[in-house]
Amino acid sequence: MRFIGSVIEKLQRHPKRIVFPEGAEPRVLQAARQFHALRLGAPILLGDRTKVKDLAAALNLPLDGIRIINPAESEELDNFAHRFYSLRREKGLIEEEARRAMLQPNYFGAMMVAMHQADGMVSGTSHITGSVLRPLFQIIKVAPQTETASSCQVLEVEDTRFGERGVLMMADCGVVPDPTVDQLADIALSTAQLANHLLNVRPRVAMLSFSTKGSATHPSIGKVQAATALARQRAEKKGFEADFDGELQVDAAIIPEIAERKLADSKVAGHANVLVFPDLNSGNIASKLVRHVSRANAYGQILLGLNRPAADVSRGSNAHDILGVAAIVGAQAIAFKELYPGAGETLPGEQ
């Protein structure tokens, strides 16, 4: 709670509107209740109003301060459908399909965020990743000056010797299966920027591999080495202060004693607070393994590189996890134009 408590305090000073497309999901309703109770902003639940109210009554949760929208009954349905049609007609979408899409909460929620009717979106408790990401990529798309949409997981472990007082940012654990050198560099830089924003520290980014500084040879190692150099170059070009090192094995990245034996002159080794995995297999497996074996607090997937803040939570998330993710998405929204200059100024596709 140390980390998420600081995020909550930041959001209390700058409350935001977060839309939850899964309004009739008990864990989401509980998280929305807490979001309002903690004065983090205005939670917006999508779904059938009767179902949401019946669920709230069954859970003995008051709905004051929580907005409920049924997309099928919304005054914005026609406008949203027209907007979506305009965005996708070149892809062969017809108007009837656009309207059907907007009846789906994830599409409606994504359009709310795109149209500045919400500051961020959190979904995924009862939907597979593709059902959450597809509307976001079709409607919100990537931010200006950004080429790669990815994700990160924020893990808070009890042992404060790891990461930044027990907080580790891990990426990409949810979006890009086999990143190119360019994509891996983008993932590293985007995650470092979020780490700086959330933790208020200089990011120390470890680009992970099964090798440390040439202890093995394989094409995948060359990719990590090239991505490390490119991430460093892009950070310098932006004037963004962070340390990048790789390729590093994970023990050399987070354990000082091992780092001392393997490479004593690194600013990152032994003290990394951002871990960047070479592919989605390793990232997803490692993040879930650490979360469950260490009983860590896990908040993710926080989406990076989009034109608006959003997150795709795990279907195994509890109400506390969802609340934490919503708080992080809200905190992203506070300084989103600093993270992604030019983001959010227009709906993608508009001039």
Image: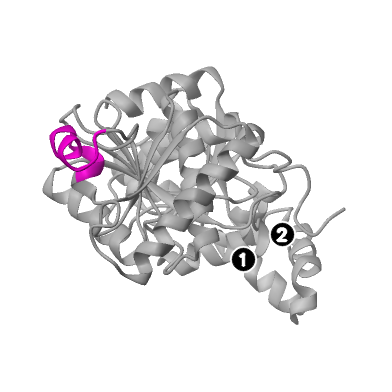
Secondary-structure class at tag 1: loop
Q: Residue lying at the far bottom in this picture: please name it.
A: 92
Q: Residue at x 76, y 52 (%)?
A: 347
State yes or no: discs 2 and 1 in contact (Cβ < 8 Å). Answer: yes
- Quarter in which the N terminus is drawn: top left
Numbered mark located on residue 77 in the image: 2
Q: Along the line of sight, which residue is nearer the eye, 214 or 169?
A: 214
* Element at label 2: helix
Q: Quarter of the image holding residue 36?
A: top left
Q: How many marks?
A: 2
| Position above or below: 170 against 65 | below
Which residue type carries mark 1? Answer: Leu
Residue 261: in magenta span: yes
* Residue 103 tag number: 1
Q: Is the magenta region chiefly helix, strand or loop?
A: helix
Left or right, 192 with respect to 142, comes to: left
Quick check: 335 left or right of 78?
left
Residue type highlighted by circle 2: Leu
Residue 210 in magenta stretch = no
Q: Position of residue 330 (x, y in %)?
A: 52, 34
Using the image, determine if residue 161 lies above or below residue 91. Answer: above
Q: Measured from the top left, where is residue 281 in percent x and y? A: 31, 66
State the residue at coordinates (47%, 57%): 226
Question: Visible in this render: residue 20?
Answer: no
The residue segment tinted magenta is 252-264
